[in-house]
Amino acid sequence: MAMGMRARESVNMSEDLTQAIAPYATALHDASLQSHCSSCFHRIPAQSPHDMSCTMCGSVRYCCSDCLISDCEVHSSSGECCFFVKHLREASPSTLTEETSDIRAALRLLYSLETRGLVSSDSVSSSNRIGGLSASGIREVLEEGGEIAEGVLEGSLLMLSARKSRMKNYVGLSNGLTIEKVALWAVMTNSVEVQISEEQSLGIAVYGPSFSWFNHSCCPSASYRFVLVPQNEGCTSNKPESCVVPVSKGAAPDAWHAWQNEEAGFAHAQCKYGPRVVVRCTKPINKGDEVFITYIDLLQTRCDARNLKSPHNAVTDPAIEDLDNNLQQAISEYSFLDDSKACCDVIESMLSENLMNDLQQEELSPRKYILHPLHHISVSSFMILASAYRCSAFKSSTDNLHGENCDFIFRMTKAAAAYSIVLAGATHHLFLSECSFVTLLSHFLLSTGQSILDFAECIKGETRKNMPEAIFSFASCSTNSAKHDSVRYNQFRSTCEKFGKPLLSLSLQCWPFLAQGLPCLEKIKNPIDFSWLGPAIFQAFQLSEEDSFNLSGKHAPATLIEQQKECILSLAVCCITYSKYLARSKSFLFVTLGRLEESSSDWAVKIFDLNNGAKVYSRIKEYYLHFAKMADEYDRSSYRRSGADDEEGGYNKTNTGDYGRSGDDYGRDTGLFNESGNDDNESGYKNTNTDEYGSTGSYNKSNTDDLTGGFNKSGTDDYSGGGGYNKSGADDYSSSGGYSKSGTDNYSGSGGYNKSGNNDYSGSGGGYNKSSAGDYGSEYKDSSTGDYGRGDEYKKSSSDDYDGGYKKSSSNDDGYGGSGYSKPSTGDYDSGKNASNTDGYGGSGYNKSSTDNSESGYNKSGTGEYGSGGGYNKSSTDNYESGYNKSGTGDYGSGGGYDKSDAGDYTGGYNKSSTDEYATGRGKTSSDDY
Ligand SMILES: C[S@@+](CC[C@H](N)C(=O)[O-])C[C@H]1O[C@@H](n2cnc3c(N)ncnc32)[C@H](O)[C@@H]1O
């Protein structure tokens, strides 16, 4: 029996599908326990007058007495407090370094379910669920043995010992399972990394069915974000009720019981302050369609290897895996040595040997496999290079405050800008065929804009501090997210194409100059339009004659002529405006918008005065106005929701006219529609009086309702009983609007869930397992396609940020604008393969999760020796004011990737975050039944 979620009404892109959902249980990562509140997840200010901690264990802290009061019962009664005391007292030094958030979340989950009467041994044994959450695959994992099984066994014993003193009765299950093992496994397969803003993942959270029943797809139709209460209450979703309803294959009374319990708001009551999650669609979704989120890094799923003998086929090959492993190893070694330039050299030499130059020529070569620039190894190399070059420039500029090293800095910032452009171009290319890449694109565009501005600054040869700058604001680009919640998809796409054109032509003009001297990039003929790779690659744009001329490489301007300076700045403006447009129109409300709105509500772009400032300024401003107008036109043609908006067209609702609830959208999708009460006229669906979405639980409908295309009930369906949406085993949702599979998913064939492409859910651990290349079964192999194998390691949270790389914490301005390849501490690809924050790399650099075993590849030492703040540390004297700024406290420490030594720290290096969700497994096992 498998659960999923589907839309109960048609929705346009960028609408919240759920309310802000409260968690069943949360646990901060070990690394955040001292810096953040264990109840609300807010950072505890350095000298907080309200700071308090648990007097028994001293391991958890709270920001205020409300938080302490609301959390103390679960902390102590779940056994977490006891766990800390025992663990710290009895554990061996090596076990102490293991991340404990999974175990603590499982303790809290069990307590929370037990107090609500949602745990019974019978139901857990028979349904492989606990509290409605899937725990499928646990038996197989334990039978197979190996590291994951060991982790579950050891963790459950620690849980048992922590709970013993408080347990009323011991709950044993059949086949040697215990309730602790099941709870721990449920955490491993259902929890998500909580990432707020640009910070590293703070911890994990397990949500009830209303979130945990969303399945995974590589072409997801929704993403999710986290909101903290109470400070961020204003950011929570205004959605009055959920737009999604569960769908199940097979009856599951206990699952429905859990669903009803959650609907009744018990989770909200119990977890008063924990991080809420809101699911938002990223594409238009039809009524009845299943809604998918992604648990994994989308870049890894798209950017495949190419078989030259058969250009249309993606391949995985041992040679490709070796290359990936070597690359990751180089990254970690050089990160360790704090030598970003050496790291760049090694990666570039490996990459340029293997990067495709020209498909036609390569076809003639004896070599069979080659990386094209969109291969995920290439893409991750670009991310690392963009970031490491920036870091190198930054380091050099701070080490040489008097500008002795101008030439070096010039080359470093130029390379950083060039790699950023190709990264933005690659993501843009992917975005054109799959709009789920929108978040990544927005982030990479922003990073690119920032890198180019760094370079522009360097061209001028002065530090930012002393530079006259012109600031103009994007006032007309309002960032009122509510206004943009509902957008016309086609218009959105067409505006994106409009942005694509100047992006292409400006990049082409700058490209020969920027790529010059960089062998890998010289091979890339066009960093935005990859049609030069051959017909298999989607042709995105029509080139003008001028662009074609540039592309032909017939003229390669070696010197930076005035026109190019202007072009470079215009490109920065284009990237930043485009980024802003994407962020706003998608109302991400997380990483990107947060970053753009960082210091003021009116976001400003700094344009630097070049040789003939006034002229350049006015040209750039022209560009700006052009781009802003483009975005604005789009705004005007979007829907308007209230009388206040009427000056700009759209559909106006008058004071006297009653078009339904004040919050109704007008013109969403069809342009002019009225929505009253609970009717939805958009697709002809009428909600009759007798329809009932939720008083007794899930989806109840009357006999006479016809939900054409949506939830059609068959003769054998039974909506009665527990009030949920129960369907009998015989129902088939596959054809007419029921349980619809996504394009790439294949539920047919042998009856189960068949993976598409190179994704493999069938591995040992119930996680999201990648194909051949990565097998975590017995040892950790970091391969090209990524391995989500055991069900809980490769996690990242929804606001993942690939932008820059070597990254510092959000409060600082390091010139990466808080970007960088951010990902949370347990799943960290910072500079390649990452281990969890228990590995001693501080959550950065080369991190692996606690269960990873790197025996065959890169082995980390016992306690790790990268210090607290991650890999690449900067020295204490660095001053990043002119670019990479560190915070006053100089603390990038806890989770950082490419950190500089002493006080400087780029916290989190190559971090990734919430849109990419490796969500603690969230994988499916071979035993899952679809
Ligand atoms: C967070 S749960 C999602 C809800 C789950 N289907 C259920 O029945 O509760 C994660 C588990 O769902 C399954 N799953 C998620 N996405 C899937 C997909 N696209 N196809 C098949 N199984 C999937 C896997 O078993 C995975 O471990």
Image (spheres, rainbow, N blue to C red):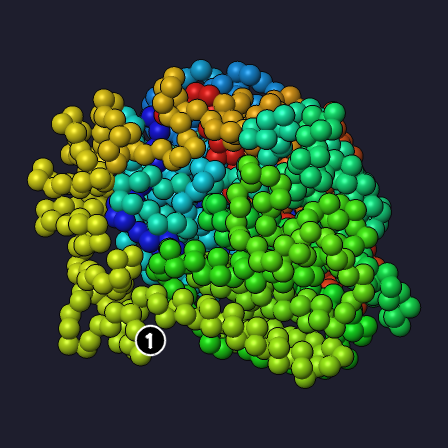
Residue at image position (66%, 42%) is 373
Residue at image position (63%, 69%) is 570
Residue 43 is at least partly visible in this image: no
Q: Quadrant of the C terminus?
A: top left
Residue 575 versus residue 69: which sits nearer the camera?
A: 575
Q: Is residue 923 left or right of residue 13?
A: right
Residue 386 versus residue 795: which sits nearer the camera?
A: 386
Ligand 1 occupies quarter: top left
Residue type, mark 1 in image: Glu
- In the figure, residue 216 lies in which quadrant? top left
Q: Residue furthest front?
A: 545
Q: Taking 363 as reference, is 841 above or below it?
A: below
Residue at image position (43%, 55%) is 493
Q: Is residue 626 left or right of residue 729?
A: right
Q: Is residue 879 left or right of residue 242?
A: right
Residue at image position (28%, 26%) is 250
